[in-house]
Amino acid sequence: MLVRIVKMKFEPENLPRFMTIFEESKQAIRSFKGCNFLELYQDKHDATVFFTYSFWENESDLEAYRNSNFFKSVWAKTKILFADKPEAWSLNKIVSLA
């Protein structure tokens, strides 16, 4: 399994638009082949910073999603709202305790 974390910082005035985009897209993202989990987090001390946290079956599923027309459309609408360059990490899960 691959864990994907993406950090995004938005201009304050763009927060409502981002939340609308995420609400409209979250089910389609989660339903994409290979996506097993999706969450959105907001920083406790900086309301303009968000993280997406998702689990993917493998890197090829994530890449298929990233190369899809759906992702390109959503990303085009989202990236114009940023206050800073986004950061992303692809990680292998080593241990998980529930």
Image (spheres, helix red, strand yellow):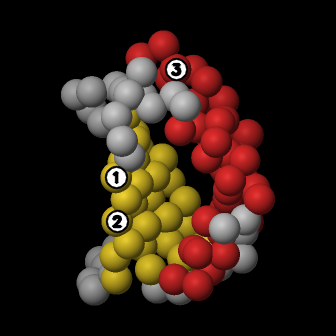
- In the image, 37 versus 77, the foreground residue is 77
Image-based side of 19 in relation to 87, left or right: right
- In the image, 66 versus 38, the foreground residue is 66
Evaluate if marks 3 and 2 touch, with contact meaning CB atoms under 8 Å apart.
no
Q: Which residue is mark 2?
A: 89
Residue 49 is at least partly visible in this image: no
Evaluate if marks 3 and 1 touch, with contact meaning CB atoms under 8 Å apart.
no
Residue 70, compared with residue 15, is above or below; it is below
Q: Which residue is mark 1?
A: 87
Query: Which element is circle 3 on?
Result: helix
**Residue located at (68% from left, 56% from top):** 71
Query: Which element is circle 1 on?
Result: strand
Query: Which element is circle 2 on?
Result: strand
Numbered badge on residue 14: 3
**Residue located at (50% from left, 72% from top):** 55
Percent of width and height locating residue 22: 62, 40
Residue 78, compared with residue 91, is above or below; it is above
- In the image, 21 versus 44, the foreground residue is 21
Instruction: State how far apart marks 1 and 2 are (Cα).
Output: 7 Å
Crowd tier of the residue under label 3, counting other residues whose Cα lies within 10 Å: few below 14, some 14–19, many 20 or above: some
**Residue type marked 2:** Trp
Q: Dividing the image into 4 quarters, which one contains the C terminus?
A: bottom left
Evaluate if marks 1 and 2 touch, with contact meaning CB atoms under 8 Å apart.
yes
